[in-house]
Image (cartoon, rainbow, N blue to C red):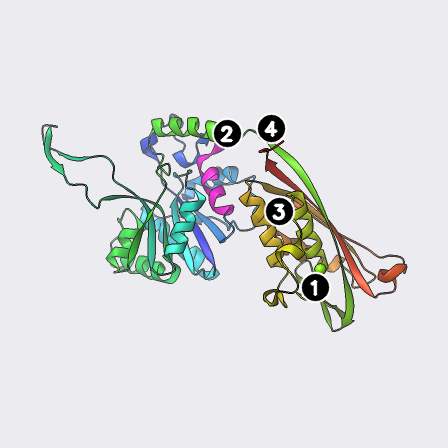
Amino acid sequence: MKIAALIVAAGRGTRAKTADAVPKQYLALAGRAVLTHTADRFLAHPAITETVVVIHADDEALYRQAMADTTSPRLLSPAIGGATRQLSVLAGLRHLAPHAPDLVLIHDAARPFVDRPTLDRVIAALETRDGAIAAAPLADTLKRAGTDGSIAETLPRDNLWRAQTPQGFRFPAILVAHERAALAGRTNFTDDAAVAEWADLAVALVEGNPENIKLTTREDLQMAERALAASVPSAAAFEPRIGQGFDVHQFTTGDHVWLCGVQIPHTHKLQGHSDADAPLHALTDAILGAIGDGDIGQHFPPSDPRWKGARSALFVEDAVRRVRDRGGRLVNVDITILAEAPRIGPHREAMCREIGHMTGLAPTRVGIKATTMETLGFVGRREGLAALAVATVLLPITDI
Ligand code: MG
Protein backbone atom coordinates (compact mmCIF):
# COMPACT_ATOMS: atom_id res chain seq x y z
CA MET A 1 0.00 0.00 0.00
CA LYS A 2 1.53 3.31 -1.12
CA ILE A 3 0.24 6.38 0.70
CA ALA A 4 1.21 9.84 -0.54
CA ALA A 5 0.77 13.21 1.15
CA LEU A 6 0.04 16.37 -0.84
CA ILE A 7 0.54 19.60 1.10
CA VAL A 8 -1.03 22.69 -0.46
CA ALA A 9 1.23 25.70 0.15
CA ALA A 10 0.55 27.78 -2.97
CA GLY A 11 -1.77 30.36 -1.38
CA ARG A 12 -0.82 33.98 -0.96
CA GLY A 13 -2.10 34.10 2.63
CA THR A 14 -3.12 37.72 2.45
CA ARG A 15 -5.50 37.47 5.40
CA ALA A 16 -2.63 37.10 7.85
CA LYS A 17 -1.66 40.69 6.81
CA THR A 18 1.99 40.39 7.50
CA ALA A 19 4.09 43.52 7.15
CA ASP A 20 6.71 41.88 4.95
CA ALA A 21 4.13 40.16 2.74
CA VAL A 22 5.61 36.71 3.26
CA PRO A 23 2.85 34.12 2.68
CA LYS A 24 1.74 32.79 6.05
CA GLN A 25 2.88 29.22 5.41
CA TYR A 26 6.47 30.54 5.36
CA LEU A 27 6.21 32.69 8.50
CA ALA A 28 8.29 31.54 11.44
CA LEU A 29 6.59 29.60 14.16
CA ALA A 30 8.84 28.68 17.08
CA GLY A 31 11.83 29.41 14.85
CA ARG A 32 10.79 27.33 11.81
CA ALA A 33 8.42 28.00 8.91
CA VAL A 34 4.79 26.95 9.42
CA LEU A 35 5.21 24.69 6.36
CA THR A 36 8.21 22.95 7.96
CA HIS A 37 6.16 22.04 11.03
CA THR A 38 3.34 20.76 8.81
CA ALA A 39 5.57 18.74 6.47
CA ASP A 40 7.33 17.13 9.45
CA ARG A 41 4.05 15.63 10.64
CA PHE A 42 3.68 13.75 7.34
CA LEU A 43 7.36 12.90 6.82
CA ALA A 44 7.43 11.35 10.31
CA HIS A 45 4.45 9.06 9.62
CA PRO A 46 5.86 5.58 8.87
CA ALA A 47 3.05 4.61 6.46
CA ILE A 48 3.40 7.70 4.22
CA THR A 49 5.76 6.81 1.39
CA GLU A 50 5.89 10.11 -0.54
CA THR A 51 5.21 13.73 0.33
CA VAL A 52 4.89 16.51 -2.22
CA VAL A 53 4.39 20.20 -1.45
CA VAL A 54 2.55 22.38 -3.97
CA ILE A 55 4.06 25.86 -3.98
CA HIS A 56 3.49 29.18 -5.76
CA ALA A 57 5.91 29.81 -8.64
CA ASP A 58 7.26 32.89 -6.80
CA ASP A 59 8.04 30.96 -3.62
CA GLU A 60 10.80 28.57 -4.73
CA ALA A 61 13.46 30.32 -2.64
CA LEU A 62 11.16 30.41 0.42
CA TYR A 63 10.41 26.72 -0.05
CA ARG A 64 14.09 25.77 -0.34
CA GLN A 65 14.81 27.71 2.83
CA ALA A 66 11.88 26.15 4.72
CA MET A 67 12.89 22.61 3.79
CA ALA A 68 16.68 23.10 3.93
CA ASP A 69 17.09 20.88 7.00
CA THR A 70 14.68 18.20 5.79
CA THR A 71 16.71 15.16 4.88
CA SER A 72 13.93 12.63 4.32
CA PRO A 73 14.15 10.82 0.97
CA ARG A 74 10.35 10.61 1.13
CA LEU A 75 10.09 14.32 0.24
CA LEU A 76 9.63 14.74 -3.51
CA SER A 77 10.52 17.85 -5.48
CA PRO A 78 7.80 20.53 -5.16
CA ALA A 79 4.97 20.98 -7.65
CA ILE A 80 4.02 24.43 -8.93
CA GLY A 81 0.43 25.40 -8.15
CA GLY A 82 -2.32 26.96 -10.26
CA ALA A 83 -4.62 29.98 -10.05
CA THR A 84 -6.94 28.52 -7.40
CA ARG A 85 -6.49 26.11 -4.50
CA GLN A 86 -8.31 23.48 -6.54
CA LEU A 87 -5.98 23.86 -9.53
CA SER A 88 -2.99 23.71 -7.20
CA VAL A 89 -4.20 20.38 -5.83
CA LEU A 90 -4.66 19.12 -9.40
CA ALA A 91 -1.05 20.11 -10.19
CA GLY A 92 0.09 18.19 -7.11
CA LEU A 93 -1.94 15.11 -8.05
CA ARG A 94 -0.44 15.12 -11.56
CA HIS A 95 3.02 15.41 -9.97
CA LEU A 96 2.28 12.33 -7.86
CA ALA A 97 0.72 10.29 -10.68
CA PRO A 98 4.01 8.73 -11.91
CA HIS A 99 4.56 7.37 -8.36
CA ALA A 100 1.16 5.63 -8.57
CA PRO A 101 0.14 5.91 -4.89
CA ASP A 102 -2.92 3.94 -3.74
CA LEU A 103 -4.08 6.69 -1.38
CA VAL A 104 -3.41 10.41 -1.10
CA LEU A 105 -3.86 12.67 1.93
CA ILE A 106 -4.39 16.29 0.87
CA HIS A 107 -3.54 18.81 3.56
CA ASP A 108 -3.33 22.60 4.04
CA ALA A 109 0.18 23.86 4.83
CA ALA A 110 -1.40 26.28 7.30
CA ARG A 111 -2.52 23.45 9.60
CA PRO A 112 0.69 22.56 11.44
CA PHE A 113 -1.07 20.93 14.39
CA VAL A 114 -2.45 17.86 12.59
CA ASP A 115 -1.66 14.85 14.78
CA ARG A 116 -0.76 11.23 14.15
CA PRO A 117 -4.10 9.77 15.43
CA THR A 118 -6.01 11.97 12.96
CA LEU A 119 -3.82 10.76 10.07
CA ASP A 120 -4.33 7.16 11.23
CA ARG A 121 -8.13 7.57 11.40
CA VAL A 122 -8.33 9.07 7.89
CA ILE A 123 -6.11 6.29 6.47
CA ALA A 124 -8.18 3.61 8.26
CA ALA A 125 -11.47 5.00 6.91
CA LEU A 126 -10.13 4.72 3.35
CA GLU A 127 -10.17 0.93 3.66
CA THR A 128 -13.90 1.05 2.95
CA ARG A 129 -14.51 4.48 1.36
CA ASP A 130 -13.34 6.44 -1.67
CA GLY A 131 -12.76 9.45 0.56
CA ALA A 132 -12.52 10.42 4.23
CA ILE A 133 -11.90 13.84 5.73
CA ALA A 134 -10.93 15.04 9.18
CA ALA A 135 -13.71 17.18 10.61
CA ALA A 136 -14.96 18.54 13.91
CA PRO A 137 -18.60 18.67 15.04
CA LEU A 138 -19.82 22.25 15.25
CA ALA A 139 -19.82 23.47 18.86
CA ASP A 140 -20.85 27.11 18.36
CA THR A 141 -24.43 28.15 17.61
CA LEU A 142 -24.81 29.47 14.07
CA LYS A 143 -26.42 32.85 13.37
CA ARG A 144 -27.32 34.37 10.03
CA ALA A 145 -26.80 38.14 10.05
CA GLY A 146 -29.36 40.50 8.53
CA THR A 147 -28.40 43.47 6.38
CA ASP A 148 -28.19 45.78 9.43
CA GLY A 149 -25.78 43.44 11.23
CA SER A 150 -28.30 42.13 13.74
CA ILE A 151 -29.38 38.50 13.93
CA ALA A 152 -31.87 37.52 11.30
CA GLU A 153 -32.01 33.82 12.12
CA THR A 154 -30.56 31.10 14.36
CA LEU A 155 -29.66 28.03 12.32
CA PRO A 156 -29.91 24.47 13.63
CA ARG A 157 -26.43 22.99 14.02
CA ASP A 158 -27.47 19.33 14.15
CA ASN A 159 -25.23 17.14 12.01
CA LEU A 160 -23.08 20.09 11.01
CA TRP A 161 -19.32 19.58 10.92
CA ARG A 162 -16.39 21.87 10.19
CA ALA A 163 -14.25 20.38 7.45
CA GLN A 164 -10.54 20.21 8.20
CA THR A 165 -7.66 18.58 6.42
CA PRO A 166 -6.19 16.05 5.79
CA GLN A 167 -8.75 14.94 3.27
CA GLY A 168 -7.86 11.46 2.12
CA PHE A 169 -8.90 9.71 -1.08
CA ARG A 170 -8.16 6.72 -3.22
CA PHE A 171 -5.65 8.29 -5.56
CA PRO A 172 -7.03 7.25 -8.97
CA ALA A 173 -10.58 8.34 -7.99
CA ILE A 174 -9.65 11.84 -6.78
CA LEU A 175 -7.29 12.42 -9.72
CA VAL A 176 -10.13 11.62 -12.16
CA ALA A 177 -12.57 13.81 -10.17
CA HIS A 178 -10.16 16.76 -10.25
CA GLU A 179 -9.39 16.32 -13.96
CA ARG A 180 -13.12 16.19 -14.76
CA ALA A 181 -13.94 19.25 -12.63
CA ALA A 182 -11.18 21.27 -14.32
CA LEU A 183 -12.38 20.15 -17.78
CA ALA A 184 -15.93 21.18 -16.87
CA GLY A 185 -14.64 24.64 -15.94
CA ARG A 186 -15.42 24.13 -12.25
CA THR A 187 -12.26 25.50 -10.64
CA ASN A 188 -13.41 27.18 -7.44
CA PHE A 189 -14.28 24.34 -5.08
CA THR A 190 -12.81 25.31 -1.71
CA ASP A 191 -11.90 21.81 -0.62
CA ASP A 192 -11.28 18.42 -2.17
CA ALA A 193 -14.26 16.80 -0.51
CA ALA A 194 -16.42 19.23 -2.52
CA VAL A 195 -14.73 18.05 -5.74
CA ALA A 196 -15.31 14.45 -4.64
CA GLU A 197 -18.98 15.11 -3.84
CA TRP A 198 -19.42 16.75 -7.24
CA ALA A 199 -17.97 13.54 -8.76
CA ASP A 200 -20.33 11.35 -6.67
CA LEU A 201 -17.62 9.78 -4.53
CA ALA A 202 -18.62 8.59 -1.04
CA VAL A 203 -16.72 10.68 1.51
CA ALA A 204 -16.74 9.81 5.22
CA LEU A 205 -16.41 12.29 8.08
CA VAL A 206 -13.71 11.27 10.51
CA GLU A 207 -13.22 12.84 13.93
CA GLY A 208 -10.35 15.33 13.63
CA ASN A 209 -8.39 17.03 16.37
CA PRO A 210 -9.90 20.31 17.65
CA GLU A 211 -6.37 21.74 17.79
CA ASN A 212 -5.90 21.12 14.04
CA ILE A 213 -6.78 24.74 13.24
CA LYS A 214 -5.95 26.59 10.05
CA LEU A 215 -3.71 29.55 10.79
CA THR A 216 -5.47 32.39 9.03
CA THR A 217 -4.98 35.61 10.97
CA ARG A 218 -2.11 37.28 12.82
CA GLU A 219 -3.86 36.30 16.06
CA ASP A 220 -3.95 32.62 15.00
CA LEU A 221 -0.19 32.75 14.46
CA GLN A 222 0.42 34.31 17.87
CA MET A 223 -1.78 31.70 19.51
CA ALA A 224 0.05 28.93 17.65
CA GLU A 225 3.38 30.35 18.78
CA ARG A 226 2.28 30.14 22.41
CA ALA A 227 0.87 26.62 21.96
CA LEU A 228 4.10 25.38 20.35
CA ALA A 229 6.32 27.02 22.95
CA ALA A 230 4.38 25.08 25.56
CA SER A 231 4.35 21.75 23.74
CA VAL A 232 7.70 21.42 21.95
CA PRO A 233 10.35 20.12 24.34
CA SER A 234 13.56 22.13 24.27
CA ALA A 235 16.75 20.49 22.97
CA ALA A 236 17.77 19.93 26.59
CA ALA A 237 14.77 17.63 27.03
CA PHE A 238 16.33 15.05 24.65
CA GLU A 239 19.20 12.76 25.44
CA PRO A 240 21.34 10.80 23.00
CA ARG A 241 21.24 6.99 23.21
CA ILE A 242 23.69 4.72 21.43
CA GLY A 243 23.04 1.11 20.48
CA GLN A 244 25.26 -1.53 18.93
CA GLY A 245 24.47 -4.66 16.95
CA PHE A 246 26.41 -7.64 15.62
CA ASP A 247 25.39 -10.47 13.30
CA VAL A 248 26.94 -13.39 11.45
CA HIS A 249 25.61 -15.53 8.61
CA GLN A 250 27.18 -18.56 7.03
CA PHE A 251 27.82 -18.91 3.28
CA THR A 252 26.05 -21.72 1.44
CA THR A 253 25.43 -22.71 -2.18
CA GLY A 254 23.92 -19.85 -4.17
CA ASP A 255 24.65 -17.02 -6.57
CA HIS A 256 23.90 -13.78 -4.73
CA VAL A 257 23.88 -12.14 -1.29
CA TRP A 258 21.72 -9.40 0.19
CA LEU A 259 23.74 -6.70 1.96
CA CYS A 260 22.17 -3.47 3.28
CA GLY A 261 19.08 -4.07 1.14
CA VAL A 262 21.08 -4.48 -2.10
CA GLN A 263 21.25 -7.73 -4.06
CA ILE A 264 24.84 -8.46 -5.07
CA PRO A 265 25.92 -11.32 -7.38
CA HIS A 266 28.32 -13.64 -5.55
CA THR A 267 29.75 -17.16 -5.65
CA HIS A 268 27.66 -18.12 -2.59
CA LYS A 269 24.57 -16.96 -0.76
CA LEU A 270 24.09 -16.36 2.94
CA GLN A 271 22.10 -18.93 4.87
CA GLY A 272 19.23 -17.72 7.00
CA HIS A 273 15.51 -17.70 7.65
CA SER A 274 14.95 -14.25 6.13
CA ASP A 275 17.03 -12.85 3.25
CA ALA A 276 20.02 -13.21 5.66
CA ASP A 277 21.06 -9.57 5.26
CA ALA A 278 23.51 -9.56 8.19
CA PRO A 279 24.28 -5.81 8.11
CA LEU A 280 20.55 -5.01 8.35
CA HIS A 281 20.16 -7.49 11.22
CA ALA A 282 23.04 -5.81 13.05
CA LEU A 283 21.47 -2.40 12.31
CA THR A 284 18.08 -3.53 13.63
CA ASP A 285 19.72 -4.69 16.86
CA ALA A 286 21.66 -1.42 17.15
CA ILE A 287 18.47 0.65 16.90
CA LEU A 288 16.58 -1.64 19.30
CA GLY A 289 19.56 -1.51 21.66
CA ALA A 290 19.56 2.29 21.68
CA ILE A 291 15.97 2.35 22.94
CA GLY A 292 16.33 -0.67 25.23
CA ASP A 293 13.69 -2.67 23.37
CA GLY A 294 15.03 -6.21 23.17
CA ASP A 295 16.50 -7.61 19.98
CA ILE A 296 15.57 -8.76 16.49
CA GLY A 297 15.07 -12.41 17.51
CA GLN A 298 12.52 -11.37 20.14
CA HIS A 299 10.40 -9.27 17.75
CA PHE A 300 10.86 -11.50 14.69
CA PRO A 301 11.47 -15.05 15.93
CA PRO A 302 13.12 -17.26 13.26
CA SER A 303 10.57 -19.93 14.25
CA ASP A 304 7.76 -17.75 12.84
CA PRO A 305 6.99 -18.78 9.22
CA ARG A 306 5.90 -15.17 8.47
CA TRP A 307 9.55 -14.08 8.32
CA LYS A 308 10.68 -16.89 6.00
CA GLY A 309 12.41 -15.20 3.07
CA ALA A 310 11.36 -11.79 4.43
CA ARG A 311 13.14 -8.64 3.29
CA SER A 312 15.24 -7.53 6.25
CA ALA A 313 14.25 -3.91 5.50
CA LEU A 314 11.04 -4.79 7.36
CA PHE A 315 13.00 -5.37 10.57
CA VAL A 316 14.83 -2.05 10.28
CA GLU A 317 11.59 -0.20 9.50
CA ASP A 318 9.93 -1.76 12.55
CA ALA A 319 12.81 -0.65 14.80
CA VAL A 320 12.63 2.91 13.40
CA ARG A 321 8.87 2.92 14.07
CA ARG A 322 9.57 1.95 17.69
CA VAL A 323 11.90 4.96 17.99
CA ARG A 324 9.26 7.28 16.58
CA ASP A 325 6.56 5.81 18.82
CA ARG A 326 8.67 6.96 21.78
CA GLY A 327 8.85 10.50 20.36
CA GLY A 328 12.48 9.88 19.43
CA ARG A 329 14.56 10.38 16.31
CA LEU A 330 17.27 8.29 14.68
CA VAL A 331 20.27 10.58 14.17
CA ASN A 332 22.87 8.44 12.39
CA VAL A 333 23.89 4.85 11.78
CA ASP A 334 27.29 3.34 11.08
CA ILE A 335 27.83 -0.16 9.70
CA THR A 336 30.98 -2.23 9.21
CA ILE A 337 30.86 -5.38 7.08
CA LEU A 338 33.56 -8.01 7.68
CA ALA A 339 34.04 -10.10 4.54
CA GLU A 340 36.75 -11.27 2.18
CA ALA A 341 34.24 -10.95 -0.69
CA PRO A 342 32.16 -9.59 -2.34
CA ARG A 343 33.59 -6.09 -2.68
CA ILE A 344 31.34 -3.49 -1.05
CA GLY A 345 32.71 -0.26 -2.58
CA PRO A 346 30.81 -0.41 -5.89
CA HIS A 347 27.51 -0.90 -3.99
CA ARG A 348 28.01 1.60 -1.16
CA GLU A 349 25.93 4.37 -2.76
CA ALA A 350 22.98 2.04 -3.47
CA MET A 351 23.22 0.70 0.10
CA CYS A 352 23.09 4.25 1.52
CA ARG A 353 20.03 4.93 -0.59
CA GLU A 354 18.28 1.74 0.59
CA ILE A 355 19.02 2.52 4.23
CA GLY A 356 17.76 6.06 3.62
CA HIS A 357 14.43 4.62 2.45
CA MET A 358 14.17 2.40 5.55
CA THR A 359 15.20 5.00 8.10
CA GLY A 360 14.51 8.44 6.60
CA LEU A 361 18.21 9.27 7.03
CA ALA A 362 20.11 11.37 4.50
CA PRO A 363 23.22 9.74 2.98
CA THR A 364 25.45 11.98 5.13
CA ARG A 365 23.99 10.28 8.22
CA VAL A 366 24.66 6.72 7.01
CA GLY A 367 28.13 5.16 7.33
CA ILE A 368 28.89 1.93 5.45
CA LYS A 369 32.37 0.48 5.65
CA ALA A 370 33.91 -2.88 4.89
CA THR A 371 37.05 -4.68 5.83
CA THR A 372 38.56 -8.08 5.15
CA MET A 373 39.92 -10.21 8.00
CA GLU A 374 43.32 -10.71 6.36
CA THR A 375 42.34 -14.38 5.72
CA LEU A 376 42.09 -15.00 9.50
CA GLY A 377 39.23 -16.80 11.23
CA PHE A 378 35.87 -17.88 9.80
CA VAL A 379 35.54 -14.70 7.76
CA GLY A 380 39.06 -15.12 6.45
CA ARG A 381 38.30 -18.72 5.46
CA ARG A 382 35.23 -17.41 3.59
CA GLU A 383 32.89 -19.58 5.65
CA GLY A 384 30.67 -16.64 6.48
CA LEU A 385 30.31 -12.92 6.80
CA ALA A 386 29.85 -10.67 9.85
CA ALA A 387 28.48 -7.18 10.34
CA LEU A 388 28.69 -4.58 13.10
CA ALA A 389 26.39 -1.59 13.48
CA VAL A 390 26.04 1.43 15.73
CA ALA A 391 22.99 3.71 15.89
CA THR A 392 22.46 7.04 17.64
CA VAL A 393 18.96 7.97 18.74
CA LEU A 394 17.64 11.12 20.41
CA LEU A 395 14.93 10.28 22.96
CA PRO A 396 12.82 12.61 25.06
CA ILE A 397 13.90 12.40 28.68
CA THR A 398 10.95 10.80 30.44
CA ASP A 399 12.70 8.80 33.12
CA ILE A 400 15.86 9.09 35.16
MG1 MG B 1 20.80 -12.55 11.27
Q: Are marks 4 and 3 in contact (CB under 8 Å)?
A: no
The stretch in magenta equals 32-44
Task: Decide if residue 4 is on the left or right side of residue 73.
Answer: left
Q: Assess mark 1: CB under 8 A from ligand 1?
A: yes
Question: Along the polypeptide, which appears first: circle 4 or circle 3?
Answer: 4
| Residue 208: image location, x then y, percent | 35, 44
User: Pointer 3: what residue?
Assistant: 362
User: Pointer 2: what residue?
Assistant: 31
Point out which mark residue 236 bears.
4
Q: What residue type is disc 3 on?
A: Ala
Question: Along the polypeptide, which appears first: circle 1 or circle 3?
Answer: 1
- Please tell me how crowded label 3 is: few (under 14), some (14-19), or many (20+) other residues with Cα within 10 Å: some
- The residue depicted at 37 percent of the width and 55 percent of the height is 125
Which label sits in the foreground, 1 or 3? 1
- The residue depicted at 47 percent of the width and 50 percent of the height is 51
Residue 369 visible in the displayed image:
yes
The Cα atoms of the two marked residues, 4 and 2, are separated by 16 Å
- The residue depicted at 67 percent of the width and 62 percent of the height is 262
Q: Secondary structure at mark 4?
A: helix
- Please tell me how crowded label 2 is: few (under 14), some (14-19), or many (20+) other residues with Cα within 10 Å: few
Q: Secondary structure at mark 2?
A: loop
The Cα atoms of the two marked residues, 2 and 1, are separated by 44 Å
Q: What is the quadrant of the C terminus in the image?
A: top right
Task: Decide if residue 295 is on the left or right side of residue 224.
Answer: right
Question: Along the polypeptide, which appears first: circle 3 or circle 2?
Answer: 2
User: Pointer 1: what residue?
Assistant: 276
Question: Along the polypeptide, which appears first: circle 2 or circle 1?
Answer: 2
